[in-house]
Amino acid sequence: MTLFFSVLFLTACFHPKVPPVLPVPVNIYTVKAQNVFYFDKYPATLVAMNQVDLRPQVQGYITEISFTEGSHIRKGQPLYTIDRQLYQENYDLAKANLDVAHGNLKQAQQDADRYTYLNTYDAVAKQVLDHAAIALQNAKNMIKAAEQTLKMAETNLNYSVIKAPFDGTIGFSQVKLGNMVIVGQTVLNTISSDDPVGVDFLISEKQLSHFENLKKIQEHSIDSLFTIILPNDSVYPHVGKIAIIDRAVDPQAGTIRIRAVFPNPDYSLRPGISCVLRVHNQETGPRMVVPSKTVVEVMGEYFVYLVKDTVARDLSDTTKTHAAQMAIQKKVITGQTIDASVIIKKGINVGDRIVVDGVQSLHTGSVIALAKKGDADKSKKGKAGSAATQGTPSKSE
């Protein structure tokens, strides 16, 4: 029994001490406020300001196609010709009938004038005079009917040549020479206007008042508030302005559609292209901007590590302490990303110190130390080597 208590006493006396935790080497950034130039960005789609499907208003066979598919066309330019023979014959017949009606009117007018003169001498029966007056009125009515028939025939004859309703670009023809087309059913082609073009994008209902103010601003002056980035990541050289704000908010999505217009003098923009609309942010005053790598995302929320002064034990003598620094996780609200930086709207203050390198190795309460260049390089190499080791399977695998 004595031997047991002796061993227990010796074990308690020589219990190894837990070494203090080594500080994590990091780099520190001091938060500053500065004036920034940036854009709010919205996914957008190019649309034609005017677009129409060409449909025939008379029936017949296509006898002529007078354009090049995909080309720019002018208002009034002939595009398709439908067999005109029947419509030309109807027009000629209507014109001839009008000439006959004019002849009948002339005869009826002469008869009426003659009987009216004879009536002054009581040399004609009253019934004959009345019949002459009625025949004259009928002849006049026949003129009106013949004129309307001629006008209808002329309209159908004109409809047999389909012309461009406005300047724009025409697409692929949906019919070929000799095809039969039906009134109001057959789609011949589609024309879309191409200068200017619209850019449609969606905003949340919370942003509606902001964009209404932007529209009012642009009614007095046109500046570079609106630009677009094309699919090849180039910035379109012309600036645009707000043209239309939709009449209502989508109650399900809580969004509203806005259309901006951009000039398109060289017709390089085509409807249907996906692009990014950039809106120059008009907020004035300095903003807190920090490197993007200082921000950590956790389940949709964003955090940075603040540097807080504290006290730590010495490595050589644990009974002594010295001034040290500790990392404290702090939730922030981020704004627009600008290149490799991000705007912080809320959560930290100007002058705060935050960790900019080494955040992956931290948690709240981690003791930190300013990394030397050699330590940073060594740490990066160690991480790269570790990653390479993890990526290389062993033979046992």
Image: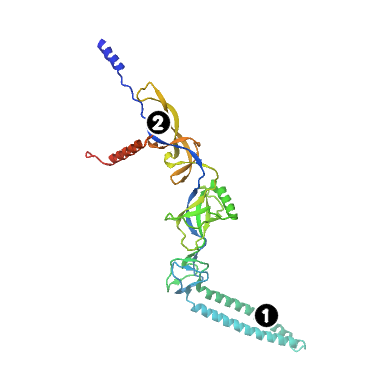
Rate crowding at label 2 as few (under 14), some (14 to 19) or many (20 or more) other CA atoms within 10 Å. Answer: some
- The x, y position of residue 270, in whole percent, is 46, 61
Left or right of residue 314: residue 389: left
- Identify the secondary structure beneath mark 1: helix
- Identify the secondary structure beneath mark 2: strand
Residue at point 24%, 39% (across, down)? 394
- The x, y position of residue 374, in whole percent, is 34, 36
**Residue flagged by tag 2: what amino acid is it?**
Ser
Q: Nearer the viewer, residue 64 or 279?
A: 279
Which residue is situated farthest in the left direction here? 395
Query: Taking 259 as reference, is 189 above or below it?
Result: below
Which residue is situated farthest in the front direction here? 373
Q: Nearer the viewer, residue 265 or 324?
A: 324
Residue labelled with disc 2 = 366
Mark linked to residue 137: 1
- The x, y position of residue 367, in whole percent, is 40, 30
- The x, y position of residue 305, in whole percent, is 43, 35
Residue at point 58%, 78% (across, down)? 150
